[in-house]
Amino acid sequence: MNRDWTESLLPASFAGVKFWVEKASVPVGRKGALHEYPQRDQAYFESLGRQAQVHELNGFIVGADCFAQRDRLLAALAKGSGELLHPWLGRLQVKVGECTLSHERKAGGVASLTMKFHPDTPLTYPTAQVNTRRQLEQASQTWLDTALARFQATMAQVDRARINLQALRSRLSGFYNLVNQQFKPLLATVDSLGALVDSLVNAPRALGALLGNYFSDLQGNLGTFSSVAADAPGSPAAALNQALGRGYRGVLASATQQAEAAATLDAPPPGGGKDTQLAAQALADLLQAALLVQLALLLARMPVNPRSESLRETPSLAVQRVQPVQRAQVPVADDVLALRERLDALIWQAALKAEATDYQALCDLRRQLDEHLDAVAASGVRLVTVQPEQPLPALVLAYRRFADATRAGEVVQRNRVRHPGFVPPQPLQMARE
């Protein structure tokens, strides 16, 4: 049963002090500028946003004790802000604006007020946000300088006359394969295993400078996230830019591969004499440090974005065929945190063989990596376990879960489903969206 409109009115009050309202108004449109042009019949209205919700009330106080009621209301208005119980709009948090109080002798026992109330919106102050990307890049540069200095100091202790070249060549065969996979641009100078051995024994300073120049070029040529840079195939940044172009999944896959390669350099095989082993260990430590720096520079390019809002309504499949769902790319937090744990373990192993100065630089790098990856993970989505009740195509699962049928490949790849047309009713890892 519908109530009469008078029964829906609320008793007006401000800060708990009641009064009567005869008329109330508030702007509800949009402010803007109207552009009119010569020799044209049509004008253009440029919208500049919503109008401020300024409530203007014409009220009054009546009764034998109207002066006492008036004084209580004036005291409440003098405080500047409070809760307005609007007869038609309900409870509002407002700030007091211009008010006018008037009395008339012929209207004895009545005090009239014209009041303006402005929205009590809290001020938002600028807040400082840590640039984890920049801090990570600085920590990686410090670690690179420390690693190069350690390499030169170690090679200065090596007696080249005592190096067993055949044994050293055998020890460096795996290192050369790693250079071929992870630092391919260096092959323009160190184009064979023999050249790597010769550079390590006879020109360690040149080898260190070569690696330093490699990272200088790399930082200058790294592209932006999710955009494929047009690099030459042999440029330092070519492989990393391809990973960046594939988004979060490409960066995480490349970083995981480099972390696995760095883990193989923890303990080179012994043998060949003290100086041979010392030279092999120096190169292993340098390459491991270089991989950590390359990892840091790659991961620093992952942006820290605000969380994206899910769709409020699900478009139909017919609509999605014409206009696919557009979503901002976000990382999977579980994948980012798993990589962080892997890198923490890798850096801890490297720290066990580090000197005091090296240890401090390595710990700084680990801390900045953790802070940046934590920030990236916080802007992503977590995984949840979903178990369908019956076998369904991945297309249907993606549409039901994400309102986006084009994400069927994500379901198939993450859960290693053999055929996208038949997803078995078993626990599945899917994004929480």
Image (cartoon, grey):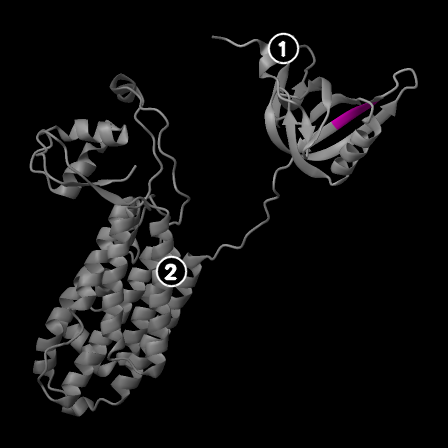
Left or right of 89 on screen, residue 218: left
The residue wearing badge 1 is 42
In this view, 362 is above or below 278: above
Residue 290 visible? The answer is yes
Percent of width and height locating residue 21: 72, 20
Instruction: Please tell me in which quadrant of the rendered image residue 100 appears.
Output: top right
Is residue 150 on the magenta stretch? no
Viewer-nearest residue: 50 or 274: 50
Residue 185 visible? The answer is no
In this view, 244 is above or below 427: below
Instruction: Please tell me in which quadrant of the rendered image residue 70 appears.
Output: top right
Viewer-nearest residue: 171 or 323: 323
Disc 2 residue type?
Answer: Glu
Left or right of 224 on screen, residue 165: left
Disc 1 residue type?
Answer: Gln
Quarter of the C terminus within the rendering: top left
Percent of width and height locating residue 289: 27, 70
* First in sequence: mark 2 vs mark 1: 1
Say what secondary structure mark 1 lies in: loop
Number of dots carrying numbers: 2
Percent of width and height locating residue 216: 37, 64
Which secondary structure is most common in the magenta stretch?
A: strand
The residue wearing badge 2 is 371
| Tag shown at residue 17 | none
Say what secondary structure mark 2 lies in: helix
Report the span colored magenta: 111-115
Instruction: Give the spatial CA distance, label 2 vs label 1.
Output: 56 Å
Residue drawn at the location 24% of the way across and 78% of the way down: 352
